[in-house]
Amino acid sequence: MPLGDKCYPMVSVVIPAYNVEGYVRRAIESLQRQTLTDFELLVVDDGSTDRTGDVIRQCTRHDLRIVDFHTDNGGAPAARNLALAHARGKYVYFMDADDWAEETMLEDMVALAERESLELVVAGFYIDTYYGAEGQHTSEVKSRPSAVFETQQEFRAAAWQLFDQNLLYPPWNKLFLRERIERIGLRFRDTFWDDFPFVLDYIRDVERVGVIERPYYHFIRQRSESETSRWRPDMYEKREEEHGWMLDLYHHWGLDGDPASMEVVQRRYIERLVGCIENVCNPECTYPTDEKLRLIEQMITSERAQLAVRLARPRTLMMRTMLNPIKTKNARLAYHEGRFISFVKDHDARMFATLKANR
C-alpha cells in the first residue's frame, strides 16, 4: 500500500458482533467520535438472532467509512478473519462490540506508530465491571509507563511486565501493522478465546514495539451470557494449552531461564487454575460432587500445578491463602473455595471484581 495513497485508510477497525443489540451502537459511535477520521470500520454481524443487524445498518446509513457484513453464525474467529480479508488500512485495530473507546485513541496510537516506525503499539485499558440497575460500576486500570523498545531484545526482556498487567493478552488495546499480519499469514484460530493465540503469534518475532501508558479502551464486564461467565467443560484443557504456548514463547525467546519472566508465567497459570476450579463449581456444571472432587484433585496434583505453586509469588495475602489448597493437594478444601468464589461471582459482581483486581 503506497503511503501517500489516500484511497486507502490509515486504520482498519474490525468489530465482530453477535446478539449485542444493546451495546453495538455505543461501540460504533465511540469510533465515529474519534479525532482521527481516516479509518474504515468493518463490522461483521455474525448471524445475530436479535436486532444487532438492524442497529448496525442504522449506523452505516450516513457514514461511508463503515462497511457491514452479515453472515451465518460462524463464531468470532471467522468473523474477524472475514473482515481481515477485506481490510485495506495500513494498521488494524480490533474491537469487541460490547466495549467502547475514548476519542483520541486511534490518533494517539497512530501518531506513535508513525513517528517511531512501529509494528505494534500497546496502550493501557480499563476493565469496567457493572453491577446493579443504575449503571454503577468499578473501574480497574491496566497500564505500564510509556516506552519505545528500540530492539527486539529490549521488548522481549520487558514483555513479562506487560504480561503481568494483562497488556499482551487481548487484541483490543493494540494497533497492528497490517503488512506484518499478511506477511506472516496470521489469522484467528477456530477456537474460543481465539484472541490470545493471535497476539502470541504476532509478538513472537515482532521487532519494534511501543507502549502508551494512557488507557483508552473500556472493556466491559456486564453481560451474564458473555464468554467469560459460562461453564466450560473444556476450560482446564484450554488453560493447559495456553500455558504450553507461553512456555514455548519464552523458550523461543531464550528467556525460559529468566526468573522474572518465569515467575509471571507460573503465577498466571496458577491463578487461572483457581479459575478452572471455580469453573467446576459453577452452578451450570451438573457433575456429581464426587466427579468434581476427582477433577479438582487431578488439576491440583499435576506436576505443572505443583511447579507453578512453588515458583509463583502472589502479591496479596488473599491470593496466597487461595493457593494453600493447591500447595497441600487438598481437593476438598479447593472444592469449597471454588464454591465460594462461584457464589460471589454470581451474587456480588462488585465484590468479585474488587477481589479479582486485588489478587
Image (tube, helix red, strand yellow):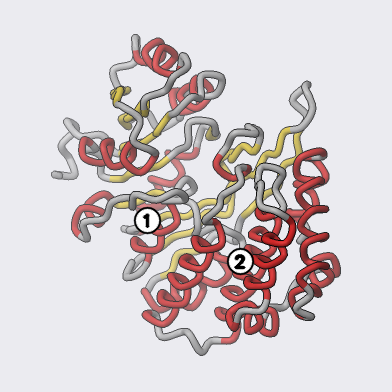
* Among the two numbered marks 2 and 1 on one chain, the one whose residue lies closer to the N terminus: 2
State the residue at coordinates (69%, 84%). 310
Q: Give the residue type at disc 1.
A: Phe
Badge 1: how crowded within 10 Å, few (<14), some, or many (20+)?
A: some
The reply to whether residue 43 is visible in this rendering is no
Q: How many marks?
A: 2
Whole-percent x, y for residue 177 in the image:
30, 52
Whole-percent x, y for residue 221 in the image:
64, 38
Whole-percent x, y for residue 143 in the image:
61, 56
Secondary structure at numbered mark 2: helix
Whole-percent x, y for residue 131 in the image:
76, 32
Compared to 231, does 143 lie above or below?
A: below
Q: Give the residue pinned by disc 2.
A: 164
Q: Give the residue type at disc 2.
A: Asp
The quadrant where residue 322 appears:
bottom right
Say which of 332 and 148 sits in front.
Answer: 332
For this view, does 135 lie left or right of residue 149?
right
Compared to 68, does 182 lie above or below?
A: below
- Image quarter (top left, top right, bottom left or bottom right) of the C terminus: bottom right
Secondary structure at numbered mark 1: helix
Badge nearest the viewer, 2 or 1:
1
The reply to whether residue 80 is visible in this rendering is yes
Badge 2: how crowded within 10 Å, few (<14), some, or many (20+)?
A: some
Q: Confirm or deny contact between disc 2 and disc 1 (CB under 8 A).
A: no
Say which of 126 and 317 sits in front.
Answer: 317
**Which of the numbered marks, if any, corresponds to residue 186?**
none
Q: Give the residue pinned by disc 1.
A: 198
